């Protein structure tokens, strides 16, 4: 076994199962970016986390351009298309 293998196996990673915590009777959830709260109950914190994750997913979809098939007759980069349209009139 390489020495680096032993070092890498000792690394502990954050697990999402421990996102909720209670402090002074108020509930919070943690993300990579921050801690959110306080909430009156764990259920309220869970619902807020669900909304948070849904909003991230929606933002991701908005930032990812959809692939659109080009119509070969509507290629705006082809300068001759305008000539063909004028000839059709």
Image: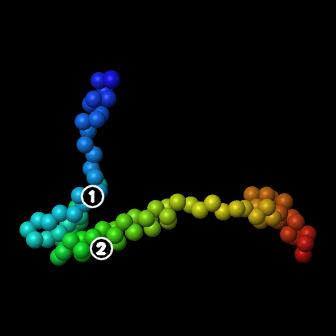
Residue that mark 2 sits on: 47
Compared with residue 67, is residue 1 higher up or lower down, i.e. above or below?
above
Residue 81 location in percent, x, y?
83, 63
In the image, taking residue 24 as reference, residue 86 lies left or right, namely: right
**Nearer to us in this view, 59 or 43:** 43
| Image location of residue 28, percent across then percent down | 20, 66
Instruction: Say which residue label 1 marks.
Output: 17
| Figure quadrant of residue 10 | top left
- Name the residue at the top extreme: 2
Residue 5 in the image, given as x and y percentages of width and height: 32, 29
| Count of numbered badges drawn on the protein | 2
Q: Residue at x 23, y 58 (%)?
A: 18
Return the x and y of residue 58 as percentages of the image width and height: 45, 67
Task: Give SS at disc 1.
Answer: helix
Closest to the observer, 38 or 62: 38
Spatial separation of the CA atoms under disc 1 and disc 2: 15 Å
From the image, which quarter does the N terminus lie in? Answer: top left
What is the secondary structure assignment of the residue under circle 2?
helix
């Amino acid at each position: 076994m390489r020495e680096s293998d032993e070092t890498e196996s000792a690394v502990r990673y954050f697990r999402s199962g421990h996102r909720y915590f209670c402090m002074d009777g108020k509930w919070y959830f943690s993300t990579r970016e921050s801690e959110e709260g306080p909430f009156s109950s764990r259920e309220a914190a869970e619902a807020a986390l669900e909304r948070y994750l849904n909003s991230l997913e929606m933002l991701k979809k908005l930032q990812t351009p959809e692939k659109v098939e080009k119509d070969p007759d509507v290629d705006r980069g082809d300068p001759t298309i305008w000539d063909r349209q004028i000839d059709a009139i």
